[in-house]
Image (cartoon, rainbow, N blue to C red):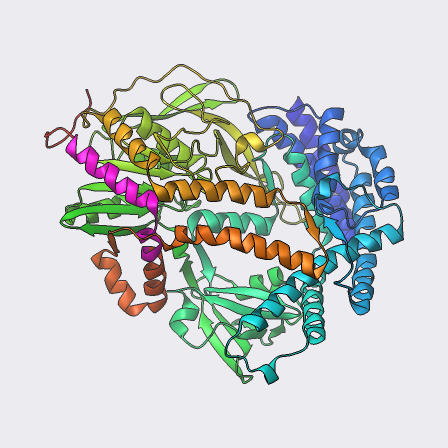
Amino acid sequence: MKKNAFLISLSLLLAMSSCSFTTKKFDTDKKKDKVLIELITYVLNEYHFNKADIDNRFSKNVYDKYIKEIDPLHRNFYQKDIDEFKKYRKKIDDQINNKELDFFNLTYNRLQQRIDESESIYKEILDEGFDFQKEESIDNDYEKLDYPDSKKEMRERWRKQLKLNTLSSYYDLSRSQQEDEELKEEDKVSQDSLKRKAISMTRDALENFYENQEDMLRKDWFSMYLNAITGQVDPHTNYFAPRDKDRFDISMSGKLEGIGARLQKERDHIKIVEIISGGPAWKHGKLEVGDEIQRVKQEDEDKSVSIIGMRLEDAVELIKGPKETKVTLSVKKVDGTKQKYTIVRDVVEIQDTYARSAFIDKEGEDYGLIKLPKFYFDMDDYNNRNAATDIEKEIKRFKKKNAKGLIIDLRNNGGGSLKTVVDIAGLFIEKGPVVQVKKSNGDMEVLEDEDDKILWDKPLVILVNKLSASASEILAAAMQDYKRAIIIGSDQTYGKGTVQNIINLDRWMRNSSIGEMGALKITTQKFYRINGGSTQLKGVSSDVVLPNRYSYIEIGERDYKNPLPWDQINPADYNTWSGYEKIEKVIELSNKRMKNNKQISLIDEHAKWIKKQRDKDVYPLNFLEYRKMNESTEEQSEKFEAINDYTSSYDFKSLPYEVKMMKKDSALADKRKKWHEALKSDVYVEESIHVLNDLQRYTKDDKLAKAK
C-alpha cells in the first residue's frame, strides 16, 4: 500500500513537471527538487539499514548541519537572518513530508544576497589597507562565534580575517626577501611594496573564490541541502547529483573516457594542470601543462564552442566523450601562440587508483610490498580490472622473485568493493569465512572464500592507520582473526562497519522528460568480523601499535554525531592459520623494538605537537607578535625535521615489468622514484620487514602451512 501511495504521489509530481517546460527553467528546477525529495525519502524508508524517524529531532539536526555547511565561518548571515531561519528548525520534517521548499528557498535566496554584499565588503577593506602595528588579535574558533548583529560587526569580522590572510603573505614575502642571499641590496623592494603585493595576493585569492561561487548553480546548493537530510540517517548515506555519480564511478574504477588531462579554472580560463600518463593527450604529445583550452569542437558538429568563462564542470563535459570519438581543441599555448589539436578520445586509466608494488632487497633477504590505495572495481563489469586480480598478479610476480615475505599497505585506504576483499583474503587462506553481513531485516549472510588454493603461504604483514576504513578493516580483521597476518599501525582503524549500495534514482523516472535525477549512496548492511565483533566505531586494533601524525586528532567514525552503534553477533565457523609457531612472540619482539625506537618516540612527540597546533584558535594581527609566534613555531618544528631525514638500510625497486614501462614513461619513473625514496624513510615499513623476518624464523618448515 505504501509503495502504491508513493507511486501515485510521484506520478502527480511528474504530471506537474511535464507541464512546466513551457515556464521558466527555475520553475522546472523547483518541481524537479520536489520529485527528488519524494524519491530520496522513499528510498531511505524502503532500503536503509536503520530506518530514521523524520520528526522534530531529525528536523533540528538537518537545520544545524545545513546552516553550518552553507556558512561555516559565520561571515555570510546576520543574527536577524538566523532568527528568521529558526522558525523552520522544527518544521523541516514537515517540509520534507509535504515536499515543500520554503526553507531551502529562503536560505538559498538570502545566501546569494549576502554573498553579493560580502563581495563589496572585501573590496572596500582591501582598498583601505591594514595597519600591522596595531595591537589586536583574531579568534578563529568560528563555531563559538555569534552571528553579527550589524553591518559594522560583519565588516569587522571580514576585516580581521582579511588582515590575517594578508599578514601571513606579508610575513612570508618579507622573510623570503630577507633570507635570499643572492638578492642584491639594490634589488630589494620596500616594506610598503611587499605589503601591497600581499594585499594583491589576498585580492587574487578572493576573486578566484567568488568566481567559483558564481559558478555554483541553484542545483549545487540544493544538493547540499539534500545531503544535510541524508546525513541524518547515517554519515555515509549521500545524494549524488548526476555528475557526482560519474565522479564516484571514476574514483572506484580508476577509469574514464576522455583525453586524459586534468583541468583547472583560473579566473575565466580553463587550463591544463596535469597530463595523465598513457592517456590520449599524453600519446598525442602536443598538449602541455599550462596550456589554456579556449574552444572545443565535436567531430559531428560544424562549429566550435567557446569555453572561456564557462563553468569548469560544463567545460569538462564538452571535452570528455566516448572512446574512439574525436574532439578538436583550440589552445593558447604557454608561449602565447595558438594551435588546434584533434585528439581521439579513449579509456584513460588513473594509475594512482591502482595497486603498485615495490621489491625490497637486502643481503639476499627479499620481500615484497603492495600499496593498495582503495578496493577498486569496475561498477559496470566486475570482471574488468579490479583490486583483487591486480594483487593476484603482483603476488605471482613476487613468487617468481622468491620473496620471503609480503607487506600489504592499507594506510589511508578508505575502502571500496566488498567482493574484492573476499577475493583478496582468499589469496592467503584456505577456503572459509571472510566477513559476516547483516541485512536490515536481521538476516545474516557469511561471505566466504570458496577456493581451497592458497596463492601466498609465506609471512604476511598488513599496515594500517586511522584512515584505513571499511573494506580495509574487513581484510585486516579477517587476517587478524585467522592469525594469518600481523597488523601494524594505529591503535585502531577508522571504525566504519557498514556497507553502502548505489541506487540509481532514474529507475523510477522512465519515460520522464524531467532529466537525470542522480543516485543515492545508501547504507544497506552492517558487516562483522568472523569472530563476531563489529568494526563499527571500534575499528581494528593493531597488534603492534605505532604512533603517526593522526594519533591525537579526532578522525574516525566515532567522531561523527550520528554513527550507527557498535554491536556483536555469534562468531562464524573458522580455523586459525597454523603456519606460525609463535606469532605472539613475534608481536612481543616488535613491541619491544618500537618501545626503544628513537624515531618512533619522535613521531609520537610530533603527533602531540600537531594536536597542540591544531587546537590553536587565537592569532595576533600585529606584525611583530605574528613574527614572534611563527619563529617560535618554526624553532619547535625544527626538531621534527629528523622524521623526514630518517633512512633505512633497505633498497626499494620496481619489478621488471614496470621497469620496461618506465623506459617509455618518464612521469611514471619519476613517481616511482619518489615513492621508493619515501619508503626508504618509512620506519613503519622498516619495522614490517623486521616482523616478516621474525615470522620467517618462527614459521613451521611445512612447504604449505595448512589450517588446523
Q: Quadrant of residue 577?
A: top left
Q: Nearer the viewer, residue 263 or 189?
A: 189
Report the number of discs: 0
Image point 46% across, 40% down: which residue? 467
Image point 72% across, 58% down: which residue? 622
Q: Is residue 428 magenta?
A: no
On-image quarter of the N terminus = top right
Instruction: Give the magenta-colored segment's residue range.
Output: 676-698
Give x and y (percent) for residue 667. 37, 66
Q: Main secondary structure of the magenta part?
A: helix
Give x and y (percent) for residue 634. 54, 55
Q: Quadrant of residue 170?
A: bottom right
Q: Nearer the viewer, residue 20 or 678?
A: 678
Q: Is residue 696 magenta?
A: yes
On-image quarter of the C terminus = top left
Image point 18% across, 25% down: which residue? 581
Q: Nearer the viewer, residue 83 or 99?
A: 83
Relative horizontal placement of residue 37, taking residue 234 as reference (left or right): right
Report whether residue 457 is seen: no
Give x and y (percent) for residue 426. 27, 33
- Residue 160 in the image: above or below residue 502: below
Give x and y (percent) for residue 104. 78, 42
- Residue 585 in the image: above or below residue 507: above
